[in-house]
Amino acid sequence: MPVFIWDDAGEGDWALGGASQWWLHQSLAVLGTEIRERGGQLILRRGDSAKELERLIESTGADAVYWSRRYEPSIRQRDAGIKSTLKKRGIEAQSFNGALLHEPHTIQNKQGRPFQVFTPYWRHCLVLAKPEPGGDAPTRWPALGRWPESVSLDDFGLMPALGWASGFQSVWQPGESGARQALTAFAKSVIDGYARARDFPAERGTSRLSPHLHWGEISPRQVWAAVKAKGADRGIFPPSKGAQVFLAEIGWREFAYQLLFHFESTPTQPLREQFRQFPWRDDPAGKLLKSWQLGQTGYPIVDAGMRQLWTTGWMHNRVRMVVGSFLVKHLRLPWQRGAEWFWDTLLDADLASNTLGWQWSAGCGADAAPYFRIFAPVLQGRKFDGDGDYVRKWVPEIARLSDKFLHAPWEAPAGVLANAGIELGRNYPRPVVDHGEARAAALAAYKMLRETRPN
């Protein structure tokens, strides 16, 4: 009997954001249809997980419960309690790894402690055997007789009330079939060029598997097997430099889960404790944060990324680094505010990866970006969107500017701006901060933090 329980309160401090709820609704709809086509029914319940499982066991006489493990701190605690209670009642209760290549508790360095640097972590993991994917789902569901009561998917209230999610459907295909198609297309025609193409946001150079991986519609075992199969055709593994770099990105996802597992406070607290004293800028009215959230900073590559996020529920990884650096080092606003916004607006809002990414940007986490690494948004735009295709798509009000001025409109002469239909401060904002001044202030803040660090 396949069951999904919508236990929003059971998610602890990290209840699903709006974008995640949209994906969950779509994915459950697809799953329910696929199960019905095989003669079964997906039972939906809403409420406390333990209580709903108890009701289902009482009404059906079930003597075993199985589920895929999750690794968020509050979920681990909840599920451990459920497992203990079920076993005391004589109910078989087993959980399984369906989300990772290697579970966090199985990986240790030579000192018996968790890795905090990616390269030795991944080097260690590469020599370990990788589990093979499981078999396909049955073509026909075993007859159950009378199915227990199920609520409607609409009763979960997952669909956003605002129309901002309307653009998601044209970009994404939630569900296992969509995940398989995305993996097949990537492995066939994109992966070999991934090492270079992944840095250019206007190109289709990434896998776009992150939402499917997050929601369990495909597993890293299947991803690994697909890359391995491609290598078998050539007699080598990984089959290309692109494949090697891509698998390392799967490794970063694994690394993020290990950090979350061993350092449970990191979603809200820096791993490096001295960063708790970082002198963040005051933004009492929230104007700077709002300009960043809405893609109105005056820096086109930053604004393009934030608008892509709002419209599609996803942002290119290179641009994620740029907008993350801009928030914490140009605006000098707490990385937690960025993590919260991403949590609400990303379809692949994964607590482990989101935490690792933001602590990396702020320089306060494991294997983090050095404090002096401050992405220059104009340089990043010119280097990775030289033709301006990405910016022109997401910031159309400046699309008529030439490539020379596209990534720095304030440098354009008045006549050039006028011919392009741009009036800075009216139909496109002036930069909310000066890059040189912001960089100097950030470096000074990080320098002060280093000097006051206890020995």
Image: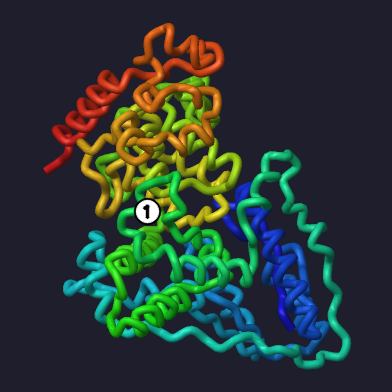
Say left or right for 241 vs 453. right
Q: Reply above or below: 351 against 326.
A: below
Q: Quadrant of the N terminus?
A: bottom right
> Toward the viewer: 293 or 148?
293
Give the colour scheme of this rendering.
Answer: rainbow
- Residue found at x 17% / y 36%: 450
Residue 163 spot, x, y in % from top left: 73, 40
Q: Reply above or below: 162 against 28.
A: above
Q: Which residue is mark 1?
A: 198
Is residue 262 visible to the viewer in this orientation of the structure? no
- Residue found at x 47% / y 67%: 71
Is residue 440 visible to the viewer in this orientation of the structure? yes
Say left or right for 193 vs 84. left
> Toward the viewer: 68 or 86?
68
Residue 409 spot, x, y in % from top left: 40, 19
Q: Residue furthest left?
A: 455
Q: Reply above or below: 90 against 263.
A: below
Amino acid type at circle 1 is: Arg
> Toward the viewer: 228 or 159?
228
Q: How many marks?
A: 1
Residue 355 spot, x, y in % from top left: 41, 51
Residue 165 spot, x, y in % from top left: 68, 45
Q: Quadrant of the C terminus?
A: top left
- Residue found at x 29% / y 79%: 237
Q: Residue furthest right?
A: 146
Q: Reply above or below: 227 against 316.
A: below
Rendering quarter of residue 374: top left
Disc 1 secondary structure class? loop
- Residue found at x 81% / y 90%: 144
